[in-house]
Image (cartoon, coloured by chain):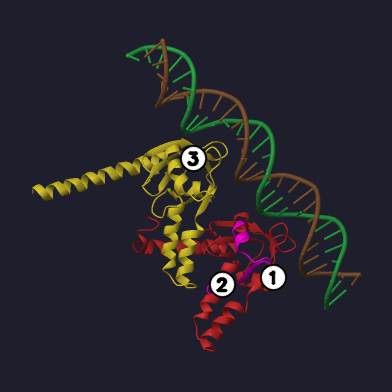
Chain colours: A yellow, B red, C brown, D green
DNA sequence: TTGACACCCATGAAATTCCATGTGATCCCA
DNA sequence: TGGGATCACATGGAATTTCATGGGTGTCAA
């Protein structure tokens, strides 16, 4: 199975274009639908979530459990589909990040592509470093707890 | 599979015309019946629902599950079909929104097209922003329900 | 004859496609 | 194993196309 792994940092050029890291492109080539990739603001982080067709099908599956024409379904649809943008990939493997998405993630001139398995995230590099450090610290805590439990 | 995805805001011109966003048109071209699109007031929001043939079939399916000559079916038929308009698409991909529909959604000079997967909605942009915020809040509340979806 | 509307064309801005360059990594062969 | 040739890839910019929008004209009906 193909996964998005590792982190790459690329530049946004004057036209708002960014190259998708080649390894990610390779994964997308098998999974993306011809039109491009799906991208939307992360719910709980100043970042963007992105992925291919597999990600979109997850959203569909989620909504298909709700009855047609219910308030609830419309509302979730708005949040799940209304915020999504389809970013087309040009011949050189680049996408254009629209203003709205850039604002949400605070992107300026460089972006970090962070592999998360079946999807990836797009971060402002410095912010991602902070988040990464926090995550490491947390893992250390957990390991410590685990170790204390075993040995204590 | 083709879905209506993302949100676009366009202008109503002096003649009452609005361009349907090109990505939506692409979806409609495969799905719409030649005459135009179906459009009607949303049941539970100050907005319009719209879509192509697939949407119409969904409505049919919904009604066919209810017993003939039941009050419920009559009411729903009226609610769903009674206010439906077929809007023809001109050579430049534009529609004209009749007065009745514009009134229901409070449309002035700009409209937001909101992709909802199998259909899309037409909103007065500011109202939609409020709804979008509410929807996001709700999704955050319901997070646990679809932990396996968007947040992987 | 006056609107309402379908059809056609013009235009500027934005997006997509195409081509060029630099650089770092990889490969191959002496 | 060193060193040159090659390739992959990110990046920059030009050329071309798409698209939203504005406006004109003809037709049909009230």
Q: Quadrant of residue B52?
A: bottom right
**SS label for mark 1:** loop
Q: Is B123 displayed left or right of B138 in the figure?
A: right
Q: Which residue is mark 2?
A: B57
Q: Quadrant of residue B148?
A: bottom left
The residue depicted at 59 percent of the width and 61 percent of the height is: B113
Query: Of callouts 2 and 1, which one flags the residue occurring earlier in the amino acid sequence?
Result: 2
Q: Position of residue B79 (x, y in %)?
A: 57, 80
Question: Given the image, what chain letter belongs to the residue carrying mark 2?
Answer: B
Disc 2 and disc 3 on one polypeptide chain: no
Task: Give the magenta range.
Answer: B26-48
Q: Nearer the viewer, mark 2 or mark 3?
A: 2
Mark 2 to mark 3 CA distance (whole Å): 45 Å
For residue B42: magenta? yes
Question: Given the image, what chain letter belongs to the residue carrying mark 1?
Answer: B
Mark number for residue B98?
Answer: 1
**SS label for mark 2:** helix
Q: Position of residue D12 (x, y in %)?
A: 57, 30
Q: Which residue is mark 3?
A: A108
Q: For the residue carrying disc 3, how many other residues have a C-alpha within 10 Å: few (<14), some (14-19), or many (20+)?
A: some
For residue B77: magenta? no
Q: Position of residue A102 (x, y in %)?
A: 50, 46
- Residue B48 to residue B79: above or below: above
Which residue is situated farthest in the left direction here? A152
């Amino acid at each position: 199975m193909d996964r998005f792994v590792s982190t790459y940092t690329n530049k946004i050029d004057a036209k708002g274009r960014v190259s998708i890291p080649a390894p990610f492109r390779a994964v997308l080539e098998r999974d993306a639908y011809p039109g491009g990739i799906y991208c939307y603001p992360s719910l709980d982080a100043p970042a963007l979530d992105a992925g291919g067709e597999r990600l979109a099908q997850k959203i569909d599956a989620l909504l298909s459990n709700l009855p047609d024409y219910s308030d609830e379904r419309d509302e979730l649809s708005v949040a799940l589909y209304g915020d999504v943008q389809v970013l087309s990939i040009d011949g050189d493997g680049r996408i254009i990040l629209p203003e709205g998405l850039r604002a949400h993630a605070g992107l300026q001139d460089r972006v970090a592509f962070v592999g998360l398995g079946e999807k990836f995230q797009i971060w402002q590099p410095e912010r991602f470093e902070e988040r990464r450090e926090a995550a490491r610290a947390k893992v250390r805590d957990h390991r410590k707890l685990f170790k204390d439990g075993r040995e204590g």
